Amino acid sequence: MFDISMTEGVGYLASLVLMLSFLMKNINTLRIINSAGCLLFVVYGFLLATSWPIIISNAFILGVNIFYLAKHFRAN
């Protein structure tokens, strides 16, 4: 029925997780779920025979999310 490769599956999953993250009202929950999506996109970028634009942009966003999550959790 669905004939997709593992690479496509990772890409679709990354997109789904990223879209779900933007439905969150709490910014920390958004950042956590968004980080999972970004990490999946980094994996997807490597599975695409190293697609640097996907890898670099999502690694950067992942780093920003981690920075602000660490800042938030250190303050509490």
Image (cartoon, grey):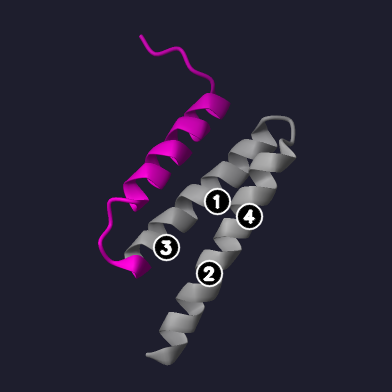
* CB contact under 8 Å: marks 4 and 1: no
Say above or below: 58 vs 15.
below
Place of residue 33 in the rendered image (x, y in percent of width and height, measured from the top left): 39, 56
Q: Main secondary structure of the magenta part?
A: helix
Given the current orientation, which residue lies at the most extreme left position? 25
In terms of secondary structure, where does tag 2 sit? helix
In the rendered image, which residue does mark 1 sit on?
39
In the rendered image, which residue does mark 4 sit on?
59
In this view, the residue in front, 2 or 60, is 60
Say above or below: 48 vs 35.
above
In terms of secondary structure, where does tag 4 sit? helix
User: Of marks 2 and 1, which one's residue comes earlier in the chain?
Assistant: 1
Instruction: Tell me if mark 3 has few (under 14), some (14-19) or many (20+) residues whose alpha carbon lies within 10 angstroms of its own.
Output: many
At label 1, the amino acid type is Leu
- Asked whether 17 falls inside the magenta stretch, the response is yes
User: Of marks 3 and 4, which one's residue comes earlier in the chain?
Assistant: 3
User: Of marks 3 and 2, which one's residue comes earlier in the chain?
Assistant: 3
Which quarter of the figure is the C terminus placed in? bottom left
Left or right: residue 57 versus residue 24 is: right
Instruction: Identify the residue at horizontal 51%, vertical 33% (top origin).
Output: 11
* Alpha-carbon span between mark 2 and mark 1: 11 Å
Q: Quadrant of residue 43?
A: top right
Task: Kindly report which numbered mark, 4 or 1, lies closer to the viewer in this rendering.
Answer: 4
Numbered mark located on residue 66 in the image: 2
At label 2, the amino acid type is Ile
User: Of marks 4 and 1, which one's residue comes earlier in the chain?
Assistant: 1
At label 4, the amino acid type is Ala
Say above or below: 8 vs 53.
above
Instruction: Identify the residue at horizontal 33%, vertical 46% (top origin).
Output: 20
